Amino acid sequence: MTTPAITHIQSRDNVFVKDLRRLAQDSSAYRKQGRVWLEGDHLCRAALARGLVPAIAVFSESFWPLAPVQYAQAAIKIVVLADALFASISGLESPAQMGYLMDLPATPALQPTMAAVVLDRVQDAGNVGSILRSAAAFGFGQVLALKGTAALWAPKVLRAGMGAHFGLRLIEALEPDALAALQMPLIITSSHQGALVQHQCLPWPCAWALGHEGQGVGEAVAARAQLSVRIGQPGGEESLNVAAAAAICLHASAVSAAPESTLAH
């Protein structure tokens, strides 16, 4: 196996360092640079498990001698940063001391019959990442993010997604009209309208639309829905967090669609 080229950087004015800092701290910088920053062992392992090849592996100077061989050899190139530099770039309270720069995946085509999650202006990065995790766990292969939704490849969304990104088809900046291409039922959820989700015979495949944290699903999306369900809340709270609602609804679909033996894994 060819040993990757290694570059040591000490200066905060280095062009690579400036670009990396933007990727780590600016939620939309990946769109301009065409690259994604994965910080930390968990995200890096998740990318490798999916067969992705990092363009550059980045290590802190103190961690570099201790870095597992497989992390270093997976990349085309290696950059070692002074500890203070890595800390200044990191978006974490406790810097992870390693990360990968990956080429931004090409935007896939919308699949009309692949189970989907539609995000309608969901703005909190933690919510979006959590919803991606639920989508991946419950067999929804694509996420369709309408304009106004948090940037899917932003660092905070990546961290909340815990590697789910790498197993999903992610499409951003769609207009509601793009949903006309779906050849399966679109379902919306409400805290006060529709039959209880557990009493519904849910279609499969389907698309679940999840809306803005304060405003819910917009009229343009709701008008396309074939089914509206609600989640029972016997405790009396006004509404659920959108990520919690997503987990309940996507799980309900998975249970309806899959044999019991499949769900046991």
Image (tube, rainbow, N blue to C red):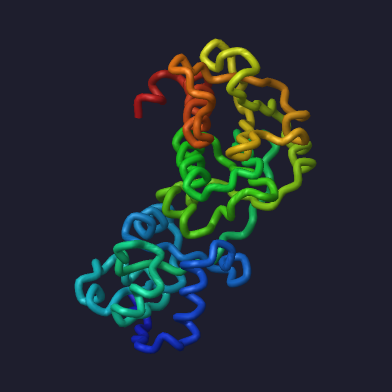
Instruction: Indicate the quadrant where residue 262 lies.
Output: top left
Taking 183 as reference, is 259 above or below it? above
Tell me what residue is drawn at x 48 percent, y 67 percent. Answer: 25
- From this viewpoint, which residue is outermost toward the top? 199
Q: Quadrant of the C terminus?
A: top left
Tell me what residue is drawn at x 53 percent, y 47 percent. Answer: 124
Q: Is residue 53 left or right of residue 114?
A: left
107 or 197, which is in the foreground? 197
Instruction: Indicate the quadrant where residue 101 lies.
Output: bottom left
User: How many numbered discs?
Assistant: 0
137 or 234, which is in the foreground? 234
- Where residue 234 sits: x, y (%)? 46, 14
Q: Is residue 6 left or right of residue 30?
A: left
Q: Quadrant of the N terminus?
A: bottom left
- Where residue 146 sits: x, y (%)? 68, 46
- Where residue 144 sits: x, y (%)? 64, 44
Q: Is residue 76 left or right of residue 146?
A: left
Q: Is residue 144 left or right of residue 37?
A: right
Taking 113 as reference, is 55 above or below it? below
- Where residue 66 sits: x, y (%)? 20, 71
Tell me what residue is drawn at x 77 percent, y 29 percent. Answer: 223
Tell me what residue is drawn at x 54 percent, y 36 percent. Answer: 140
Taking 227 as reference, is 243 above or below it? below
- From this viewpoint, which residue is outermost toward the left? 66
